[in-house]
Structures are given as C-alpha cells and as structure tokens.
Image (cartoon, rainbow, N blue to C red):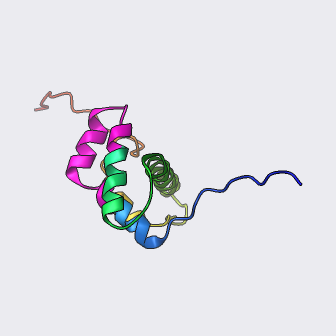
Amino acid sequence: MPPRARRAPVWSNGELLDLIAVWEEEAVQSQLRSSRRNFDTFGQISRAMIERGHDWDAMQCRIKVKELQSAYRKAREKNSHSGAPPTTCRFYKELDAILGGDPTTVQSTTVDTGEWEE
C-alpha cells in the first residue's frame, strides 16, 4: 500500500480568529512591513498562539497567514469587476481590517505628484 499524503492540519474558527487577532496587532504589522525575511516574526506569532492555548509552530502560522491573504486577495479581485456578484471569503471582514489598506491587495492606485492645479 502506498504511503498516504500528509494533509495540513485543520484550524478551528477560534484558532483562526486568535491568529487574526495576533496578526493585526500594530507591533506585528510593523515587523511584517519592515522586512521580507520575517520568520522571527512568525515565531513571535506562534508564541502568542501558544499563550492563547493553541499549539501551532512558526511555519504553520506563516502558511496559514499566507493562505488567508490569498483567499482575501482572490475575493477582493473578484469584487473589483463591475457587474460581478459579490464574493467573500472566510473572515473577510476581519481580513479587510488588516489588508484593506495593503497596497498589494489594491488593484489600482493614484499617484499624488504634489502639484496643485489652479
């Protein structure tokens, strides 16, 4: 019999809400924005999750954050098309509070040239 593929562990709603709560803290957001090499930050997120009674390591937290970001971006992208029915994802409202102002999730941006028109 061939070996079974390992499946990612399932996160409960409570665990996901706790992860989002830790992830949205200003100190965590600041660290994530300041560096692309942020494995230490996910270690801190993991420790905060352990303090909340959940046993998730840094890599598991990182993967889950990336999955949540991806689901949010896909929903937001679908919603940006006019005439499309509204799309959402799990915890969209909570993720929008974190990622709503993130330039990587916004499709079009305006540039202020600093010039005044009279």
Where's residue 29, x and y in %? 27, 46
Where's residue 56, x and y in %? 45, 57
**Does the magenta-highlighted stretch encompass residue 56?**
no
User: Is 44 in front, or is 18?
Assistant: 44
Extreme residue toward the right, this view: 1
The chief SS type of the magenta part is helix
User: Is 46 in front, or is 81?
Assistant: 46
User: Is 94 in front, or is 84?
Assistant: 94
Which residue is at a point 53% across and 61% down the rendered structure image?
A: 83
Where's residue 59, x and y in %? 47, 46
**Picture quadrant of residue 40:** top left
**Does the magenta-highlighted stretch encompass residue 27?**
yes
Which residue is at a point 36% across and 32% down the rendered structure image?
A: 36
Using the image, determine if residue 106 lies above or below residue 49.
above
Q: Is residue 109 left or right of residue 79?
A: left
Total count of labels: 0
Where's residue 25, x and y in %? 24, 55
**Picture quadrant of residue 4:** bottom right
Q: Is residue 52 left or right of residue 14?
A: left
User: Is 57 in front, or is 32?
Assistant: 57
Q: Is residue 3 left or right of residue 75?
A: right
Instruction: Name the image quarter holding the C terminus.
Output: top left
Q: Is residue 86 left or right of residue 112?
A: right
Region in magenta: 21-41
Instruction: Name the image quarter holding the N terminus.
Output: bottom right
Q: Is residue 97 visible?
A: no
